[in-house]
Image (spheres, rainbow, N blue to C red):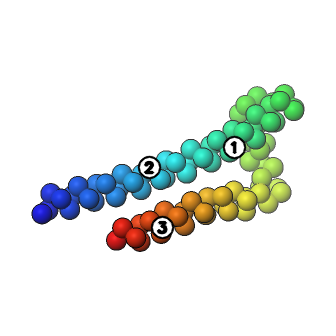
Amino acid sequence: HSMREQQEGGSILLCCLEFIIGCIERLAEYFTKWAFVYVGLYGYSFIDAGKNVIQLFRQRGWTAIIADVLVDTVLFMVSIGVGVL
């Protein structure tokens, strides 16, 4: 009985880790796309373009847009977690 509980706990932990890694991956893809736009338009290096994209998002208030994209995913995962419990 305790072995089964340990396996279930490990599965839930693995699911949470996959979710966190997925969020980081989507965020990185989002910034990468905009950084490549900066590289193409202004000729910056990729790292400088990434810094400029983050600065642009902060200045223009796009952090709210990014948060909205991530909030949907978080709410979905929380609802799945509540359903599992």
- Front in this rendered view, residue 50 or 21: 21
Question: In the rendered structure, which disc, 3 or 1, sits on the residue that comes first in sequence?
Answer: 1
Q: Within 10 Å of the Cα at label 3, are there few (<14), some (14-19), or many (20+) other Cα atoms?
A: few
Q: Position of residue 20 (x, y in %)?
A: 49, 52
Calculate the distance from the C-alpha at mark 3 to the C-alpha at mark 2: 14 Å
Question: In the rendered structure, which disc, 3 or 2, sits on the residue that comes first in sequence?
Answer: 2
Residue 48 appears anywhere in the view? no
> Badges 3 and 2: C-beta atoms under 8 Å apart?
no
Q: Which mark is residue 31?
A: 1
Apparent side of residue 26 relative to residue 18 in the rendered image (left or right) = right
Q: Position of residue 22 (x, y in %)?
A: 52, 48
The residue that disc 3 covers is 78
Task: Point out the residue furthest to the left here.
Answer: 1
Residue 42 appears anywhere in the view? yes
The residue that disc 2 covers is 18
Amino acid type at mark 1: Phe
> Badges 3 and 1: C-beta atoms under 8 Å apart?
no
> In the rendered view, would you say 81 is above or below 62?
below
Calculate the distance from the C-alpha at mark 3 to the C-alpha at mark 1: 25 Å
Amino acid type at mark 3: Val
Q: Quadrant of the C terminus?
A: bottom left
Question: In the rendered structure, which disc, 2 or 1, sits on the residue that comes first in sequence?
Answer: 2
> In the rendered view, would you say 80 is above or below 11?
below
Q: Quadrant of the N terminus?
A: bottom left
Q: Position of residue 37 (x, y in %)?
A: 80, 36
Q: Secondary structure at mark 1?
A: helix
Calculate the distance from the C-alpha at mark 2 to the C-alpha at mark 1: 20 Å
Q: Residue at x 41, y 66 (%)?
A: 81
